[in-house]
Image: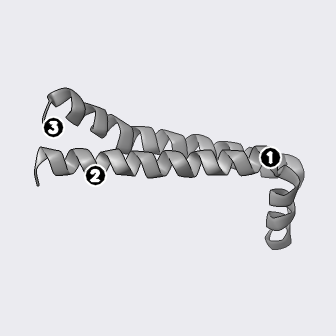
């Protein structure tokens, strides 16, 4: 696998994952009641617990995206392989 292929792979992985994070955040901010009602049909939980779960999940997801997608992409960019 070439540097160019790895660079493109990590670039597109980063872009797609950042779009997912942004989409998730928009739904939680713009339609919080709808998202809560949708999830509360499947799982019974208080609103505070729901908010904590989503906040933690988004934080973990962002951390994983940064460590496993964005950092390798930036390293390949800095190496000048492209």
Q: Which mark is residue 68?
A: none
Residue drawn at (80%, 52%), measured in percent from left and top? 50
Residue located beneath label 3 in the image: 82
**First of labels 3, 1 by sequence position:** 1
Residue 18 is at least partly visible in this image: yes
- Residue contact between numbered discs 2 and 1, judged by CB atoms under 8 Å: no
Q: CA distance from mark 2 to mark 1?
A: 31 Å
Query: Vertically, is 55 above or below 40?
Result: above
- Secondary structure of the residue carrying tag 2 is helix
Crowding at dot 3, Cα within 10 Å, few <14 / some 14-19 / many 20+, comes out as few
10 is higher (above) or lower (below) than 70: below
Give 79 or 42, whichever is nearer the viewer: 79
Residue 66 percent across, percent down from the top left: 43, 38
The label number, if any, that marks residue 30 in the structure image: 1
x then y, percent, for residue 76: 21, 36
Q: Nearer the viewer, residue 3 or 47?
A: 3
Rounded to the nearest whole Å, what is the CA distance between mark 3 and mark 1?
Answer: 39 Å
Sooner in the amino-acid sequence: mark 2 or mark 1: 2
């Amino acid at each position: 696998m070439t540097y160019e292929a790895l660079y493109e792979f990590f670039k597109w992985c980063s872009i797609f994952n950042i779009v997912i994070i942004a989409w998730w955040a928009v739904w939680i901010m713009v339609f919080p009641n709808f998202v809560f009602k949708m999830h509360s049909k499947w799982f019974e939980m208080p609103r505070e617990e729901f908010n904590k779960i989503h906040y933690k999940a988004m934080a973990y997801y962002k951390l994983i995206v940064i460590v496993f997608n964005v950092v390798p992409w930036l390293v390949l960019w800095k190496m000048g392989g492209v």
